[in-house]
Every structure is written in structure tokens, then in C-alpha cells.
Image (cartoon, rainbow, N blue to C red):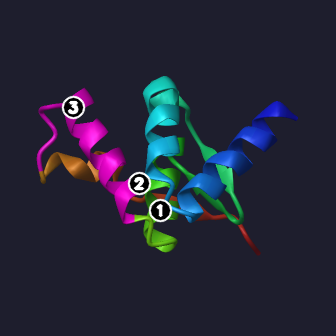
Amino acid sequence: MLTVNYDTYIRNVLRNDFHILFEVTMREDFNTWILNKKYNYGMFVYTNQYTFLLDFSRENSATRCRDLLMSRLLEKFPTVNKLDKNKFKKKTKNIGW
């Protein structure tokens, strides 16, 4: 039950582009977003929660939050360049009928 409320909170923060709240949350949970595998949302399965958050921020035009995600990724993995970003590229599967 707690994770459902947490996920809803994160989506609302991204939807409204509250970058300050998102930055505080990201400091605490960025590693779990990268390490968690197969995040389900709607009819899609994302490779991890980070790719979901990146895609969700893109869909909702949350540019400040998306910039925070990308800058944090480059801080955490400094060897990631434009060619290596495909590792975190949107890879989804449609699980609908």
C-alpha cells in the first residue's frame, strides 16, 4: 500500500514539474530507481523505474525534472556519453491485447 502512494506522489510531482521536491526525493531514491528491474505502468513494462520516470517527464513536459534526471545520471555514471545513453533509452513492451 505504501509503494502505491509513493508512486502516485512521484507521478504528481513530475506531472506538475515540482523540481525542488523531485530533487529531494531523487537524492534519496536514485539508486533504487536504477537498480529496480521491470517497472510496470499502464500497459507497458519498463526496464527500470528510471526509464519510466524519464519517459513520464517527457510525456508531461516536465523539463526541469527531466534535466535533473539526466544530470544525476551523468554524475552517477560519468562515462555515459551520447552513444552509451541507449542503455537507459526507453525500452518498453506493450502487454495489452
Magenta span has 36?
no
Residue under label 3, please give it. 75
Residue 64 falls in image quadrant: bottom left
Tag 2 or tag 3, which sits nearer the N-term?
2
Label 2: element kind: helix
Query: Do residues under tags 3 and 2 come within 8 Å of each other at their CB atoms?
Result: no
**In front here: 84 or 49?**
49
Q: Label 3 vs label 2: CA separation?
A: 15 Å
The x and y percentages for residue 94 are 62, 67
Residue under label 2, please give it. 65
Q: Would you say 86 lies left or right of 22 here?
A: left
Amino acid beneath label 2: Cys
Looking at the rendered image, the quarter that the C terminus falls into is bottom right
**What's the magenta region?**
63-81
Residue drawn at x 26%, y 53% is 86
> Tag 1: Cα neighbours inside 10 Å, few (<14), some, or many (≥20)?
many
Amino acid beneath label 3: Glu
Residue under label 1, please give it. 57
The x and y percentages for residue 5 are 79, 42
Query: Do residues under tags 1 and 2 come within 8 Å of each other at their CB atoms?
Result: yes
Closer to the camera: disc 1 or disc 2?
A: 2
Q: Would you say 32 lies left or right of 44 here?
A: left
Residue 16 falls in image quadrant: bottom right
